[in-house]
Amino acid sequence: MLTIRNTPADEKVEFDYKTIDKGHHQVKYRGVKAQRSPFDYVIYQMIISEVQPDLIIEIGTNFGGGALYMADIMNNLGKGAVHSIDITDNCTDIVKNHPRISLFHKGFEDYDLSLAKNYEKIIVIEDASHMYEDSINAINKFCHLVSVGSYLIVEDGIVDKLGVSKQFHGGPCKAIREFLPKHPEFVVDRSWCDFFGKNATNNVNGFLKKIK
């Protein structure tokens, strides 16, 4: 008896930073655009489960898929809120009506820091324009809100690897290099940066843990 098996002609696996970047712009969560690397979505849910934050401040909402993802994780934990900040309002009702999400549309400069005063454990995520100036200004403004043992996450240092950091005046990595020497209370947490391989994340050297 002759058995015929269908065998793919080409089983080569081939991808790089640019193909991953292209794909991450098409990621959706519950039908909402959620433009983060799939590696980082896995890391985020582990960090949230570990820290058990009362508040996540996300600087850079865009369509709100990331905020929705984190708010749903908080639902599973039974605690927490997301304050998501942008200068546009691109969110659909599923994001706007989530009971754990509060949206702010006047930019991080306008955010009232006193809104965070009643929260004990806080994570801050800087994911705005990726311009150096915005990155450094945002992390300098919000860093003191991060609780000890929690994280200041600076997104999209991958622009260096993609060869476009000049368009961002040095981008997030330049901001991190400037920030860390002045803030010894933060260290780069290599366990997350290197979880899938050396800086196999869009947040190159961007998982900053507050240790004191």
Image (cartoon, grey):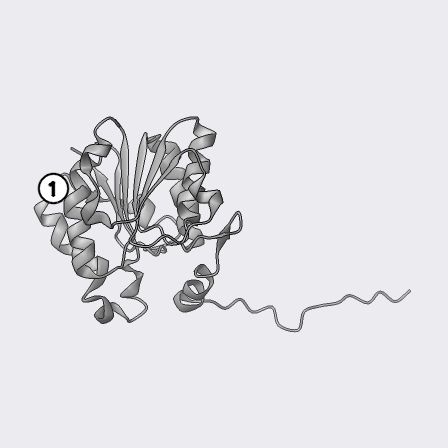
At label 1, the amino acid type is Pro
Q: Residue 96 in the image: x percent, y percent?
A: 42, 42
Residue drawn 48% across and 56% down? 27
Work out whether residue 210 or residue 120 is closer to the camera in this orientation and state it: 120
Q: What number of labels is visible?
A: 1
For the N terminus, the quadrant is bottom right
Work out whether residue 166 or residue 189 is closer to the camera in this orientation and state it: 166
Residue drawn 30% across and 57% down? 156
Name the quadrant containing residue 161. Answer: bottom left
Work out whether residue 202 or residue 69 is closer to the camera in this orientation and state it: 69
Q: Is residue 180 left or right of residue 188?
A: left
Question: How many neighbours does mark 1 have within 10 angstroms: few (below 14), some (14-19), or many (20 or more)?
Answer: few
Q: Is residue 35 left or right of residue 53?
A: right
Name the quadrant containing residue 6. Answer: bottom right
In the image as oriented, which residue stretches furthest toward the right? 1
In the image as oriented, which residue stretches furthest toward the bottom? 9
Q: Residue 93 in the image: x percent, y percent?
A: 47, 45
Q: Is residue 87 left or right of residue 135?
A: right
Task: Give the residue number, with chain letter if any, for mark 1.
Answer: 184
Residue drawn 43% across and 26% down? 78
Q: Residue 202 in the image: x percent, y percent?
A: 34, 56
For the C terminus, the quadrant is top left
Name the quadrant containing residue 70. Answer: top left
